[in-house]
Image (cartoon, coloured by chain):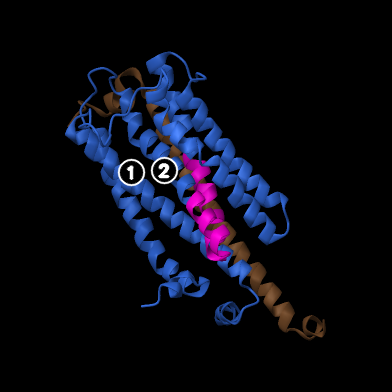
Chain colours: A blue, B brown
Amino acid sequence: MNFYHYASPTTFYRLAGKAIPWAAWTAGILAVLGLYIGFFVAPTDFQQGEAYRIIFIHVPAAWMGMLIYLVMAFWGAIGLAFNARLPFMMMRALAPTGAILTFVALWTGAVWGKPMWGTWWVWDARLTSTLILLFLYIGTLALWSAIEDVKRSDRAGALLTLIGVVNVPIILFSVVWWNTLHQGSTVGVSHAPKMAATMLQGLLLMTAAAWLYAIAATLVRVRRIILERERKTEWVRELLEKET
Amino acid sequence: MEWASWSEFWNMGGRGFFVWSAFGVTAICVLIEIVWLRRAAGQSRRRLMRMQQWDLSPEGSEK
């Protein structure tokens, strides 16, 4: 099997087309299950009452916001190192979903903070570094649209993302390094989860749903980008002809 | 089951506004993205097809 086969936009376009419905439907089913457990099975939190149920979207959205940025930086590095086309297209396809999920993390954090801390927002390390993550996404999207030459635009976006990636460990460790208002991690590798088993099940289901949703959205977007960039090639011409 | 009635469910222990605005805005964001993805894909296809027809037409191929 030739690995480079899958790196060609032609093959990837077909593969992505097959994967999208699976990812999207599985995301939907897992989200319904996760919400059911989150609202009807998971017990009331003894400290936070019912408001804690915001965790079922807040934490998956925050995780995905960071993860998508890391994946973007990965593709940016690959694209710069190997001068390939597909990695840069993947970067552009990932960014809008990452930005939306980071916004969701900030929004759900604000409406969770108000009843728990008495404030929508504080300039503490966790919140501020997450806001910077949103600005990095928006900045990268703006940079791409500002530079017309596609190759230069791709490279500039990749460079900015690689610089901005230092922010991700800052977000992750902010609750350890600094005294913040934000609570410490509930789920971690070094300790048992500090929550009821059903709460954790709901959280994991919602996280899986967020993963698959992000994958589906990214693949839909990358297919459009592939067609636009490869429009002069024979296979795209044939593909478009079949549809007319 | 955690709830005695639906009104208790919507009330969320007095935190209904916060809980439902979190879930509501998330749902709106996801829906907007889905609609946006579909529209963008359709618009892009139509534009590519128009460009292709132009390229194949006599005026387009003269260039």
Q: Is residue A154 above or below residue A234?
A: above
Q: Amino acid at mark 1?
A: Thr
Query: Which residue does the numbered mark 2 point to in the structure image?
Result: A64
Badge 2 vs badge 1, beta-carbon distance below 8 Å? yes
Q: Nearer the viewer, residue A109 or A190?
A: A190
For image coordinates 40% across by 30% down, the residue present is: A173
Mark 2 burial class by Cα count in 10 Å: few <14, some 14-19, many 20+: many
Q: Is residue B62 above or below residue A122?
A: below
Q: Is residue B24 above or below residue A183?
A: below
Query: Which residue does the numbered mark 1 point to in the structure image?
Result: A207
In the displayed structure image, the side of residue A19 where residue A122 appears, left or right: right
User: Residue A236 — which label?
Assistant: none
Q: Main secondary structure of the magenta part?
A: helix
Q: What residue range appears in magenta?
A: A72-101
Mark 1 burial class by Cα count in 10 Å: few <14, some 14-19, many 20+: many
In the displayed structure image, the side of residue A151 where residue B9 appears, left or right: left
For the residues labelled 2 and 1, the Cα–Cα distance comes to: 8 Å
Q: Amino acid at mark 2?
A: Met
